[in-house]
Amino acid sequence: MASLAAVIIGGVFLGSHAPRRPPLTLPVVLLALAVLLLGVGLLMITRVADFSWETWVRVGKWALLAYVLVAAMIEFAFVRNHTRGAPLVVVTAMLLIFALDVPFLIATTVARYAD
Amino acid sequence: MSAVVQESPLPGLAGDCLWERDQLHTIVVDPSAGAPPRQKIQIVPLKGLPVVAVLLGFVVYAIASNKLWPLMLCHVAGGALWTSIDLFVGLAVGPIIGGMSPPSRAEFSAKFMPKMVIIMPTVVTMTLASGLQIAGHLGNLKIDAPQHKWLIASMIIVGIMAVIALGVLEPANITVLWEMNKPEPNPEIIGRMMKRFVYTAGITGIMQIATLVIMSKVATL
């Protein structure tokens, strides 16, 4: 959830500066933090005994499909609003982490109680 | 709460039911009574997917065309539905579910939760994807626009709601449905997840009230 919060804060920051070119320091720091936190989350679930990986994959892949579509729509909105260059790269990376975070949360919650 | 199966002083009730120790009434569980098998719950109602596709297709059209009326339709309709559903579920449906018997609660949840899986992400996507574009269209994002600070406030509130909805509410929703599809659902897990679902729906509903005030301010400045 902290990873998700980081990308959403970054997204709000970038959105609040639209259509101007935003300062990228904070978004990049938040993006790096989000990636780190997602990695920590993945590491943590590998250490859970009897974690239902089959359930995790089953739920995660469909949730991933849904949130890739949502992220693509938001990306489209940013591109349509003339976001270009480095800000677009940062937005794209944040949306990628967003598209991974939510399925991770859904799949992990379901798998945690699967057995 | 714990799930216990016991005989009941109420003859005639049969079925594959679980109950909670702190309930005043008990329900008989009689496997020999030939209770009908529980239907598997379709976690994502497939019949709803074409409707979702049409709505999201309209959002894409609205963004691509950059015309104000379809953007406004997506944003207002999506936002109104999102707010209304959050408030209604959190403040009305939640307390009602809390007062229902466990079998009734289970039956209601089995029909209600799949619809929420498909409705909520759709209305949220409609609202957010069109909102940023409308703000740009109307010039409200310019730093000297009178609505600018209100829009920033709205983005912050929406950001918090998004974290709660995506991080807590939706995982709880899916977990309830997954658990209910098991041969022997654990009522403690279902109860815990339903509480999370209802409480967070209430919290986001109350935050939605702040969004309503802000949007009214933005529209009238």
Image (spheres, rainbow, N blue to C red):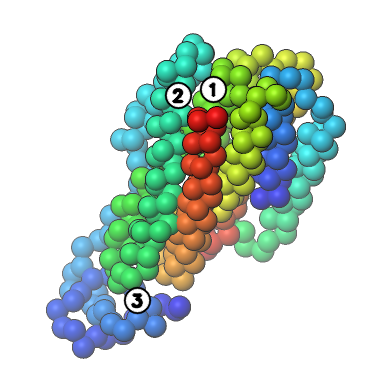
Q: Amino acid at mark 3?
A: Trp
Q: Position of residue B6 (x, y in %)?
A: 31, 85
Q: Earlier in the sequence, mark 3 or mark 1?
A: 3
Spatial CA distance of label 3 from label 1 is: 50 Å
Tell me whether circle 1 and circle 2 mark residues in contact (CB < 8 Å): yes
Quadrant of the rendering where the C terminus of chain B is positioned: top right
Query: Around disc 2, counting alpha carbons within 10 Å, would you say few (fewer than 14), some (14 to 19), or many (20 or more)?
Result: some
Quadrant of the rendering where the N terminus of chain B is positioned: bottom left
Label 2 in the same subunit as label 3: yes
Q: Residue at x 35, y 64 (%)?
A: B97
Query: Around disc 3, counting alpha carbons within 10 Å, would you say few (fewer than 14), some (14 to 19), or many (20 or more)?
Result: many
Which residue carries the number 2 mark? B72
Chain for numbered disc 2: B
Query: Around disc 1, counting alpha carbons within 10 Å, would you say few (fewer than 14), some (14 to 19), or many (20 or more)?
Result: many
Which residue carries the number 3 mark? B19
Q: Amino acid at mark 2?
A: Met
